[in-house]
Image (spheres, rainbow, N blue to C red):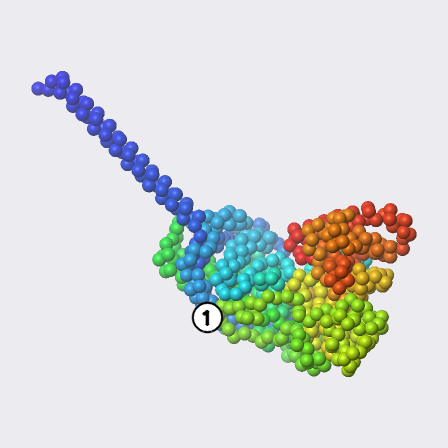
Amino acid sequence: MATPNSNILQDLLRRLAETERRLEEERLKREDAERRAERLRLSAESKRQPTSFLAFLYYTHKLLFEPLQIQTNPSLASTGGFTSVHGRYYPLELRRWTEFEVLHRRHFSTFSSTFGDQSLFHSLDVIMTVLRNESPSPLAAEDDLRPFEMNAVEQRVKNVMDKFFKLLPGPIRRVIFRSNPYSLEKVEAGPALRDSQPSPSKRLSPERKRINPDRWCIQVNDEGVRIPLFVVEYKAGHKLTPTLLQEALDQDSPDRTIFPDAVRHAAASKQASRNSTAQILTQVFHYMIDCGLQYSYITSGEGFIFLNINPTDPKILYYHLFFPKKKVHLPRSSDEELIDAATLDTYRETLMNTAIAQVLTLVCLALDRQPLNQAAKQAMQADLAQWPIPYPGQDPMPVEDAVSDRPELPQPATTLSDTSSRHQDPTKKHPRPDEDDEHGGGPSAAGPSTSTAIPQRTRDQSRKQRLPLTHFCTQKCLLGLKRNGELDENCPNIHRHRAAVGTKDSRHHPITIEIFSCLLHDQLAVDLDSDCEALDKYGKFGAIGVLFKITLHGYGYTVVAKGVQRVDRNSLKHETAVYARLDELQGDIIPVWLGQLDLAVNYILSSGAHICTMMLMSYAGEPVQAENWDTAVDYSVWGGCSGLGELLSTLEACGVYHHDVRRPNTVWNEEVGRPMIIDFDRAVLVARKAKRQLSEDLELELELELERGRERESKRRVDGIAV
């Protein structure tokens, strides 16, 4: 029989056991919580760690592309139509780019082997941040697509190329994407400008129609020299659906009639998908031809169309169509779930189909091509028809379709043969009188490359790029040429001037300024490549003009030319009037004006801008780099020479108000040992002022000039537009 004491003891033992059990449970829970916390800490730490190349492709596709949705409800999507292609170059045939798959596999293998398992790329946390900053799905318009493409594709491609270039020997290059070409942008005159001559101050009016693709991929070398590689065009997903693209493009045999059919039946509803696709392709094809580019791509977010042309046969447009979400097959898992290297390797083949991987290959292919010269660009354009002009042997466009499209026609209709006959054969070689010039020659024509490897930096590519080596003639030399004066013994090209005379000690110029102008016009009429180089890739361009470096064959006269498009010819006429007013100051505080040329054949910039008129001048120098260049009364930044205020005072005494005083327009000239003022397209001509009145106005005018200059330069910096 149990005693009371034994009952108490048993109760105590039971309570003790319960306490121990409870403590053990709490300990286990605590340890489990600690383990979970440790796992979370390690997971969070892992998510902050850089990723490998394959992991980077895995996470960017899984987190950025897999959630992508397109708005298919017409009432919620943008309602705009397609850009008119009337008057644009179009190809004759469309063919599959069958070689791309082989090229892509080789490039992807090179990237994979170069990067290996190195953790060089954005962490999972960073990629998640990119996801949060994207446009909310579903995407309903091009404006929604733009931030997605910029964040999910373009910036990621730039990240990879930055790392890749750092692993290559030699100077480091970069690849960037921009909304402008880092060159003079192509513009056309609107209806109001075609029949009027606006003043220079109104040249940026709404009537100026800019003709530009959505994005540019640009190569930048170690000194900042920029060369476009290809263009990118965005199209809203509901306009370029996978069904539409597959119906128009994804067929077993090449569709060689899509463009001729679209030209003949632009309004045919039964061929709507083919016709709209043909017009989209034509829009981008025209950009490629106009800019001298061999590659480009179109994207709707869901689908990508890579385009390729061979400059020797531009009538054929090659395409590669792919849909990343359909081609990439990854396991279903938590978005933030980490994946180990061994598992990643099993997805190597499918990761090759990601959008980023394929755009990387396109970048490398473009890097492996030399920019086309003017002869090649002119030859391509002369070989192509402009919508809706049919190619020889094709049926003409039906009258009802032609009439409906006519309002957009930018120029009178012509036949292809008429278009071609306007150009001399641009591929012919023209003899040069000064073949002994070791620095002569522009970029040579480059045929299509057959290389399929990642482009390596050759000796020519990796050397530092500077302004062309031939030196500019001096102010005194060109002033002597203009005014029938003597040669300048200090001109770096005097031996070439004298060689043209035939004596080693001649003191006289071999030609007059009138003959110089005629010879240069004739030279540029037959050869825009030799000794004629656009300097936009060095940043020498502004709102309306781009600088060229030009040497007259056989005489060595080397000058700078300011080239403009047709819409801005009146601005050069205005500048000519300003230089005439300031004739006595030329070669001293402003450049020597040498005349104006209307080119027989337009010079086509890499931006697609067509330069038709040039103003010839002496080279004034490089922009002043002093940080306080615009200090209103501090002239010490000029090395004790005449300050900015004194220069403007001199101009205003002649009745010229510059109205665009900025750093790029104030340059230092070593020859005269003082600054020079350039770019007078905004200048205003007034009656010459009396000295007393000028003195009273100068301080206020200088302050206003500098403030206007600062505001314009600040705006250009914010907009990303070079000046």
Along the viewing direction, whichever of 117 and 345 lies nearer the viewer: 117
Q: Which residue carries the number 1 mark?
A: 102
Along the viewing direction, whichever of 319 and 46 lies nearer the viewer: 46
- Residue 9 on image: x %, y %: 16, 21
From this view, report whether residue 717 is shown above or below residue 611.
above
Q: Residues within 10 Å of mark 1 (few under 14, many from 20)?
A: few
Which residue is rendered at x = 89% and y = 55% of the image? 688
- Residue 424 on image: x %, y %: 71, 79
Q: Secondary structure at mark 1?
A: helix
Residue 593 visible in the shown view? yes
The part of the image, by quadrant, that contains residue 528 is: bottom right
Q: Residue furthest left?
A: 1
Q: Is residue 676 left or right of residue 358?
A: right
Q: Residue furthest top?
A: 4
Residue 247 visible in the shown view? no
Quarter of the picture containing the C terminus is: bottom right
- Residue 193 on image: x %, y %: 78, 60
From this view, report whether residue 309 is shown above or below residue 118.
below
Which residue is rendered at x = 71% and y = 50% of the image? 628
Which residue is rendered at x = 70% and y = 60% of the image? 622
Hey, what amino acid is under mark 1?
A: Val
The part of the image, by quadrant, that contains residue 419 is: bottom right
Q: Is residue 432 left or right of residue 9?
A: right
Which residue is rendered at x = 66% and y = 77% of the image? 438
- Residue 704 on image: x %, y %: 78, 48
